[in-house]
């Protein structure tokens, strides 16, 4: 069963460019993972203007493999110093989804 993960990251003022640079490396490597169906980075237009990772995996094993990957770990270390707070991560399962 596919798994959708949505992660919201608030970034410290003045650190946006560094965050996007680190995130783009992670996004590119994540898209190449076998179990990743899509992996996109967005930014809110209102409110906090958080960065939003929109991820879709073939199953829980693919999520686990992603989280264990070297590029994800490296991004986590980089983002730790750039983020204003801990990310909000929402994991969801499909109910009524169009393929």
Image: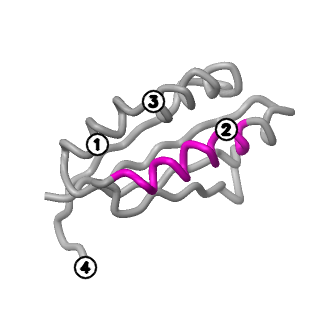
Residue at the spot of label 2: 22
Give the CA separation, mark 3 to mark 4: 30 Å
**Is residue 26 on the magenta stretch?**
yes
**Which of the numbered marks, if any, corresponds to residue 63?**
1
Residue at the spot of label 3: 70
Which sits earlier in the primary sequence, circle 3 or circle 2?
Answer: 2
Residue located 61% across and 44% down the image: 25
Tell which tag, 3 or 2, sits nearer the viewer.
3
Which sits earlier in the primary sequence, circle 3 or circle 1?
Answer: 1
Looking at the image, residue 4 lies above or below residue 72? below
* Residue at disc 1, secondary structure: helix
- Span of residues in magenta: 19-33
Give the CA separation, mark 3 to mark 1: 14 Å
Looking at the image, residue 79 lies above or below residue 29? above
Residue located 81% across and 42% down the image: 17
Q: Residue furthest bottom?
A: 98
How far across and how far down the image is residue 70, in percent?
45, 30
Give the CA separation, mark 3 to mark 2: 13 Å
Give the CA separation, mark 4 to mark 2: 31 Å
Number of on-image labels: 4
Q: Residue furthest left?
A: 1
Give the CA separation, mark 1 to mark 2: 20 Å
Task: Locate the N terminus and report the quarter of the image it occupies.
Answer: bottom left
Residue located 57% across and 21% down the image: 77
Tell which tag, 3 or 4, sits nearer the viewer.
3
In this rendering, would 19 be left or right of 89? right
Residue at the spot of label 4: 99
């Amino acid at each position: 069963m596919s798994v959708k993960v949505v992660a919201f990251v608030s970034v410290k003022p003045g650190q946006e460019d560094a965050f996007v640079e680190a995130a783009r490396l992670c996004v590119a490597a994540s898209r190449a993972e076998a179990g990743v169906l899509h992996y996109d980075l967005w930014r809110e237009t209102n409110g906090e203007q958080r960065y939003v990772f929109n991820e879709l995996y073939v199953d829980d094993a693919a999520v686990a493999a992603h989280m264990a990957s070297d590029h994800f770990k490296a991004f986590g270390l980089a983002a730790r110093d750039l983020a204003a707070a801990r990310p909000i991560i929402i994991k969801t399962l499909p109910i009524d989804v169009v393929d």
